[in-house]
Image (tube, rainbow, N blue to C red):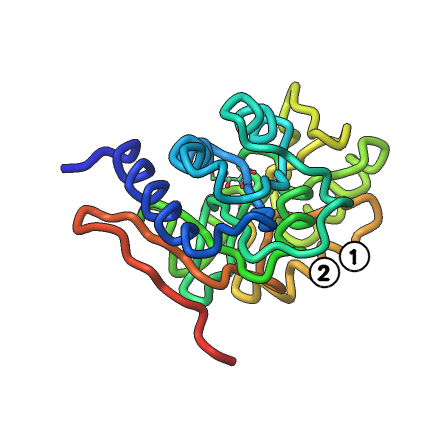
Amino acid sequence: MLTQAQLKQNVAQAAVEFTLPFLMPDVVLGVGTGSTVDLFIDALAPYRDRFRGAASSSERSSARMRQLGIEVFDLNQVEAMPLYVDGADEIDGGLSMIKGGGGALTREKIVSSVAQRFVCIVDESKQVQTLGHFPLPIEVIPMARESVTRRLRALGGEPVLREGFVTDNGCQILDVSGLTITDPAGLEAHLNNIPGVVCCGLFALAGADVVLVSGQAGVRQVERAAS
Ligand code: 5RP
């Protein structure tokens, strides 16, 4: 029986194999944040001379890449990237995700928006029928924390401040449980519209394009159904 750590290692390796054909001297890759991505960065590092570098969704991933000799670019220097590779806290059958367990949701949404394809890398424990069991992270401007909290309670959620945590953008995170997310794209649009919300951890308006799912029988690749 493979442990979750081994499943993450396997999907990180599979993600590198998926990425290799895209590596060219002028290519900048988008790289996300989290324990699965840490393993992806480690497995990608031996190929650092095959591509230009990476744009990252967190100081944590940037530091890890620099340590391993992968050049990190400010996103403002990058016009296009073929792939953005990142994990998720939950992913449903329509490839909508909850992200932000590591608190990097806003930069994840920004960097992924520049990439042609979002490649989500998960172990099978992250697959769900309906999103919402994992508390939904919402990044807020500190002065709006209480007003946003009231709006989220009115929606039926139970927001809890992530104590002692400040995002790379100097903001705070509310982790919201109790939401039944039957319409992820609709809820994402609604939450994005609450004054003081910087970003919500729903990635549904633009979900994953490809998901690599690591299970006991190996790593499966699932593509977004053509619309
Ligand atoms: C960070 C994220 C991560 O992708 C998500 O939390 C999954 O992390 P891990 O790979 O450690 O399970 O969204 O903000």
Q: Position of residue 103 (x, y in %)?
A: 61, 34
* Of residues 142 and 53, the one drawn nearer to the viewer in this rendering: 53
Residue neighbourhood size for the residue with mark 1, other residues' Cα within 10 Å, grouped as few (<14), some (14–19), many (≥20): few
Q: Residue furthest left?
A: 1
Q: Where does the N terminus fall, quadrant-wise?
A: top left
Residue placed at 28% from the left, 41% from the top? Answer: 10
Q: Position of residue 152 (x, y in %)?
A: 69, 47
Asked if 78 appears above or below 117 in the picture, the reply is above
Q: CA distance from mark 1 to mark 2?
A: 5 Å
x, y percent for residue 143: 85, 32
Number of numbered discs: 2
Q: Which mark is residue 193?
A: 1
Q: Relative to residue 193, is residue 45 drawn left or right?
A: left
Q: In the structure shown, which secondary structural element does the residue marked by tag 1 occupy?
A: loop
Residue 145: x %, y % from top left: 78, 35
Q: Is residue 10 above or below residue 208?
A: above
Quarter residue 45 falls in: top left
Q: Residue at x 68, y 38 (%)?
A: 73
- In the displayed structure, does residue 194 sit left or right of residue 131? right
Given contact means CB atoms under 8 Å apart, are the residues at marks 1 and 2 in contact?
A: yes
| Element marked by disc 2 | helix
Amino acid of disc 2:
His
The amino acid pointed to by label 1 is Asn
In the rendered image, the vertical position of residue 52 relative to residue 61, given as above or below: below
Residue 125 sits in quarter: top left
Mark 2 highlights which residue? 190
